[in-house]
Amino acid sequence: MFDDVGHWFERFLQPGALVELGVLAVCVALAWVLVQRLSRRSRAHDRRSILWGRSVVDGALFPLTLLALAYAGRALVALWLPLAVFKLAIPALVALAVIRTGAKVLQAAFPDSVWVRPIERTLSWAGWLGMVLWVTGLLPLLLQDLEDITWKVGSSTMSVRTLLEGTLTAGLVMIVALWISSGIDGWLLRSATGSSLSVRKALSNAIRALLLFLGLTIALSAVGIDLTALSVLGGAVGVGIGFGLQKLAANYVSGFVILAERSIRIGDNVRVDNFEGRITDITGRYTVIRSGGGRESIVPNEMLMTSRVENLSLADLRVWHSTVVSVGYDSDVDLVMRLLGEAALASPRVLRDPAPSVALSAFGADGLEFTVGFWINDPENGTLGLRSQINLGILRALRAHGVDIPYPQRVLHWPGDKAPQ
């Protein structure tokens, strides 16, 4: 083995190695140019894309393209020269392609997951270790030694090599399944809004679950596990779901029902259990509601199916709000109503159709109370700032026209001569 390695290193000193390096450099330049031009023309060039990344070499397309060009260059050089550089370059490019593809698939399938980074590091170390064993020729010897370590599992015999190869195959199958599901997920959710977004989200979740189930089945077969033995386990799991996991199962079923019925959709403004906000995400188990103040509530889907939910934008995105103003009893009522309506219309967020309304709502203890009602169609932007803007406009208008805004008043009557001195 070491003689072969020494002979391989001697080829690096031959003039043909310079030719291989030149061909490899041309492959790198050509791959860089191709990926750069494709990334400029492709609309799918974003941070979550598997093929593309923040730079040309960040995505999975560059190492895959470079690997294909390197194989073509190796076949061309092998017609005239003995190979030396490509025997090192091809394993390194294979390891790079596997690492970058696996990392991008995990990032796209599980964004914001804390355990993705450790898996990426493990995949990187395993890929480069396999490349070193491949180049040095130790890989066949190691596999042969692992083949000799065996044990009995029921009626079958398994070895460490079989388990290792099955695990690698299972990982490859799961990565491919996640890649396909991420691609379908991006295609379904692209440019989807409103009710269409909810339906596509439900379809995306169902497709991902189906692909992961098929991938897991193929992965278990690759490891060497007899799937017929899982029938008893499947029955036990079914009993467990029926008793101990019924709440969890109810949440998942409720999630699919919500997405299918579209009674609650992503982007709707709802009030659940005295918590009001905008729905930002609907998963299989829970729904995320974000309030105007930035707080987020994670509501189990079963609660949305079994309790009272106020959907403020189910049939219409317009929402009515109001503010109350008190003026003195001697004020000009017609003037006050005109000023209040003009102050409400001064805000660009207030809808003109339907127009704001002003009503004399009560004869208060301190003055006349007017209610100014107005409609908006963007409640997700908050209402505190809007109400403050309208109140400030009302205050300026009333002061400019000399309309009295009374202070709280109380009249005390003292009987006879018991008045305080």
Image (cartoon, helix red, strand yellow):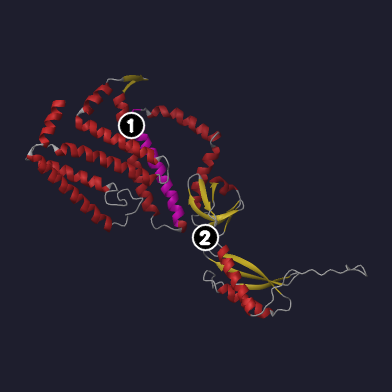
Query: Which is the main secondary structure of the residues drawn in magenta?
Result: helix
Find disc 1 in the rendering and name its residue.
167
Q: Nearer the viewer, residue 248 or 203?
A: 248
**Residue 66 higher or lower than 141, as above or below:** below
Whether residue 155 is visible to the viewer of this picture, yes or no, is no
- Left or right placement of residue 376 versus residue 409 in this view: left
Residue 368 — which label? none
Q: Amino acid at mark 1?
A: Thr
Extent of the magenta region: 196-224
Give the image quarter of residue 276. bottom right
Residue 380 — which label? 2
| Residue 394 image offset from top left, x and y in percent | 61, 73
**Secondary structure under badge 1?**
helix
Whether residue 407 is visible to the viewer of this picture, yes or no, is yes
Q: Are marks 2 and 1 in contact (CB under 8 Å)?
A: no
Image quadrant holding the N terminus, namely top left
Q: Amino acid at mark 2?
A: Glu
